[in-house]
Amino acid sequence: MVTKTGQLKELQGRHQSLLRLVELSVSLNSNLELGALLQSITATATELLNCEAASILLYDEKKPRLFFAAATGSDSEKLAEIPVPIDNSLAGTIFRTNKPLMINNKAQQDPRHYSLVSDHIKFKVEDLIGVPMPIKDRTVGVLEAVNKNNGDFDESDVEILSVIASHAAIAIENARLLKATRQALKKVNEANEIKSNFLSLASRELRTPLGIILGYATFLQEEAKGELSNHADQVLGAAEQMRSMLDQMSNLTLLHADEMQMNPMRVSIQDILNFAVDEIKYSASRLNLSLTYAFQELPIFVLVDQEKTILAFINILNNAVRFSKADGEITVGAVQQNNEVLVWVNDKGKGIPVDKLEKIFEEFYQIEPPNTRSYGGLGIGLSIAKGLIEAQGGKTWAESEGLGKGTTIKVVFPIQK
């Protein structure tokens, strides 16, 4: 009868341990804050093994040593001050061999015992059990429990601690990855904020001197004759190009800050494209480019911000002009397809490698290296166009059969009925 009672108690104890392990697993999978995870792991290990304390030592990849990341029953901050060597320490032995270690009643007499830890926190270690914390093909640390409250540590304690360590290793790795991802995102956001602030400041500060240049250049163009007039034309053309760049920088800043106000109205896509083409006729004429329309006769109405949609197509057309050969052709078309309107701008110019079709819409991306490229521009025109179009429910993409075979930029808008 006594034996059956003992067996029943043992089964009940195992059942409670399994339930506690399941609870720990759920807790670890629902919490990715590293500090809270570590405390939960050590507290559960202390409870299930009925011991005085438990601790987690993690491997420092920058320096070949272990360090206390969390502990119960002692001052964890003081423990964190002590680096534990891989050689000549019990924890280091567990880490190197990747095998559990159990010592009862004589842990301090073991030559591998690292007494600096006990002396520093004034904690005497009699019993010790430690297991590696594995993840995939490597060990990330060691989970230790010390000083059993009743009796000695046994193999069942090793099993329980090993289960905890396995769950803990995965949870710790996930928490570390999340922390690293957050830090990386923070740096990216900070870099983007610096870039946006610079673009905003530069576009604002450069407008005043540029306005003076434009004013004097216009005055000289009106008054000068002969060669001097040609010089004034060149200055005015360069200043206009710079103003276009500043406008692009300003628009990109607004898109980043989500401050772009849209004023949708019912307008025909043909009117929008005609306005956009009028804006780039001068630059197209300098390369003797012919502009061809491919419109259907009836107007196709869309609900968009007219001014910003014209700007988007000006950017697309400027890109077509920039990468077209002299005496070439640019085709602007629009056609209704079911409940959408498809617009395209086709050039016969440089073309785009197939693997770069998505990248040309990235900010500041240039297919050619910046120090050897033969085409001007900041590389943000298509980024702005895509942002303006997608902000209004449209879609933008590029098609090209490769270098030297021209490019087609396509845009789709829903039709306004």
Image (tube, helix red, strand yellow):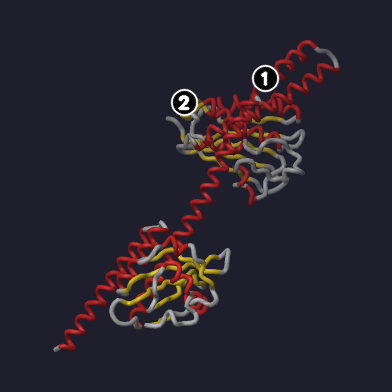
* Numbered badge on residue 263: 2
Residue 231 vertical position relative to residue 17 in the rendered view, above or below: above
Which quadrant of the figure has residue 209? Answer: top right
The location of residue 379, given as percent across then percent down, is 65, 39
User: Which badge, 1 or 2, comes first in the chain's sequence?
Assistant: 1
CA distance separating discs 1 and 2: 28 Å
> Where residue 417 appears, x then y in whole percent?
42, 30
Q: Is residue 132 visible?
A: yes
Q: Identify which residue, 239 or 8, lies in the foreground.
A: 8
Front residue (pair 369, 294): 369
- Kind of residue sitting beneath label 1: Gly
- Above or below residue 57? Residue 412 is above
Please give the name of the residue rendered at 51% of the width and 67% of the height, measured from the top-left corner: 83
The amino acid beneath tag 2 is Asn
* Residue beneath the point at 69% across and 42% down: 406
> Crowdedness of circle 2 by 10 Å Cα count: few (<14), some, many (20+)?
few
From this viewpoint, which residue is outermost toward the top? 223
Q: What residue do we see at 77% from left, 15% from top? A: 221
Please name the residue that numbered disc 1 is placed on. 211
- In the image, what residue occupies the spot 49% across and 25% down? 267
Secondary structure beneath label 2: loop
